[in-house]
Image: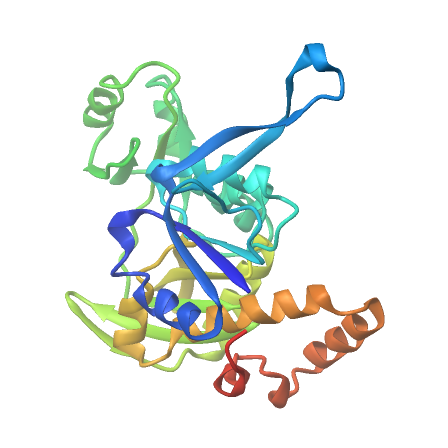
Amino acid sequence: MKIVILANESRKAKDKTIIDEAKRVFDTVVYAPINKVRFDLTTKKSSIISLGNVTTGISIKFEGKDISDADYILPIPTIGNWELFYTVLRMLEDRLTPFDANTYMMISNEELLFSFLGSNGVNVRKSLVVASNISMDKINESVGYPVIVRPPRKRVMVTNKQTLKDVLSLYKFGTPICIESPIKSEKNVWVFVLEDDVIATYEKTRNVSRTMAADADVKKLAIKVRRLAGCDYCAMRFLSEKNEWILDQFTLSPNFSNFQKVTGANIGRYIISNCIRKVRDAEKPSWQKRVSDIFKLYRLKEWGSKGEWTENIEKV
């Protein structure tokens, strides 16, 4: 079996736990930096001699080899290359992946994602997206001051209307800028979710991280967010304010190795176990898939709802 992990080369240390586990159970593991993936035209010789070679499609290659023949494609997307990730996901939409192109498009737009989650009952940070400095009154009504201004890839704390106006004037009219209400958090908790399991949780206080058991409310909320987002796994950060949990960050590309280091949970093993399960389910006759779905529904431990069964599988 073959798995292709699409990522940013600078993330390799963060993704090491996934790479190591993939090598343990897959015959072929390709770690392909997304910026080194190439799109080539595929051709075949026409039966009409005068036409010569005819273009039949586009192939996705890494180091000269087609990656679309992989049994599983595992993208670990980064914001700076989101267009490339989206394009590859769209072209490989018939392959097994942890999320599809449409899901990724929504998730990659945090404002859109949080708006969607908020409309479905998830408590999210209060925010507003503006595209000019003519919305001052609306900002005052909806968020109030101080606010956190989030132009593309930056965060700036602003305490009054005039300063906010000055900051917005630095950007071209029409540039979407998110305005957030700051939170005085009592707790800062990171959660990693796979399917319907909270795999790992840790609390971060200043620069110190320590593992913890997620309480029932955090577990329920985290699983709900994962289901609404439509991905197999994700990480998210919750802030506690006035005894309420507020979703503050959501990512498909956390520091997997750091999660493992802090919590002791083998994140790579859980993720790769899920990949193997999906590959094997795809190979089963339809009646076996239905039985598998029933087992999963009832969460039989021996079937490995958390991935323990990879301990006993041989190289495939």
187 on left or right of 91: left
Whether residue 188 can be seen here: no
Query: Seen from this angle, which residue lies furthest top?
Result: 50
181 on left or right of 52: left
For the C terminus, give its image quadrant.
Answer: bottom right
266 on left or right of 232: left
Up/down of 240 relative to 117, above or below: below
State the residue at coordinates (51%, 84%). 308
Question: Residue 252 in the image: x percent, y percent?
Answer: 43, 54
Up/down of 26 relative to 126, above or below: below
- Number of marks in the rendered image: 0
Query: Seen from this angle, which residue lies furthest right?
Result: 287
Up/down of 38 relative to 279, above or below: above
202 on left or right of 50: left
Question: Residue 15 in the image: x percent, y percent?
Answer: 33, 61
For the N terminus, give its image quadrant.
Answer: bottom right
State the residue at coordinates (71%, 77%). 297
Whether residue 9 can be seen here: yes
